Image (cartoon, rainbow, N blue to C red):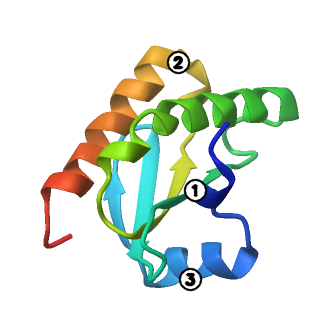
């Protein structure tokens, strides 16, 4: 579980990131991010019915995404709001594949200053 201060929860925050943020695309994930003024990273997750009609499967994907990002939060030194959107096919990945893909995307975010 992500610490409470690192969770992006309000609809207006999700909308701000999705509307104004920049994105990084992957085969199974799309990541949008925007700077915030809070001094720490907040992360939100979206898994739509396009991934699976079953809530159990969507929640499983979301839990795996959350855990994959949790260990990586301390390495992100930028003040960002991040929204991670699962794409169709993401439900077929196991935890380690999800973690590896998300870390690769977040490494791009950390290393590239002009994103």
Q: Residues within 10 Å of mark 3 (few under 14, many from 20)?
A: few
Foreground of the two, 29 or 107: 107
Local secondary structure at mark 2: helix
Local secondary structure at mark 3: helix
The nearer-to-camera label among 1 and 2 is 1
Q: Residues within 10 Å of mark 1 (few under 14, many from 20)?
A: some
Q: Which residue corresponds to mark 3?
A: 16
Quarter of the image containing the N terminus? top right
Q: Residues within 10 Å of mark 2 (few under 14, many from 20)?
A: some
Give the mark nearer the N terminus: 3 vs 1: 1
Q: Which mark is residue 6?
A: 1
Q: Quadrant of residue 39?
A: bottom left
Q: Which residue corresponds to mark 2?
A: 95
Residue 34 pos. (x, y %):
41, 75
Q: Is residue 89 visible?
A: no
In the picture, measured across the screen, residue 3 lies left or right of residue 26, that is right
CA gap between label 3 and label 2 equals 29 Å
């Amino acid at each position: 579980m992500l610490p409470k201060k690192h969770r992006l929860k309000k609809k207006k925050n999700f909308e701000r990131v999705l509307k104004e943020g920049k994105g990084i695309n992957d085969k199974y994930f799309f990541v949008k991010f925007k700077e915030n003024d809070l001094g720490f990273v907040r992360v939100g997750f979206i898994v739509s019915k396009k991934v699976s009609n079953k809530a159990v499967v969507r929640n499983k994907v979301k839990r795996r995404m959350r855990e994959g990002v949790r260990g990586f939060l301390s390495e992100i030194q930028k003040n960002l709001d991040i929204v991670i959107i699962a794409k169709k096919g993401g439900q077929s990945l196991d935890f380690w594949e999800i973690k590896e893909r998300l870390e690769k995307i977040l490494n791009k975010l950390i290393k590239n200053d002009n994103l």
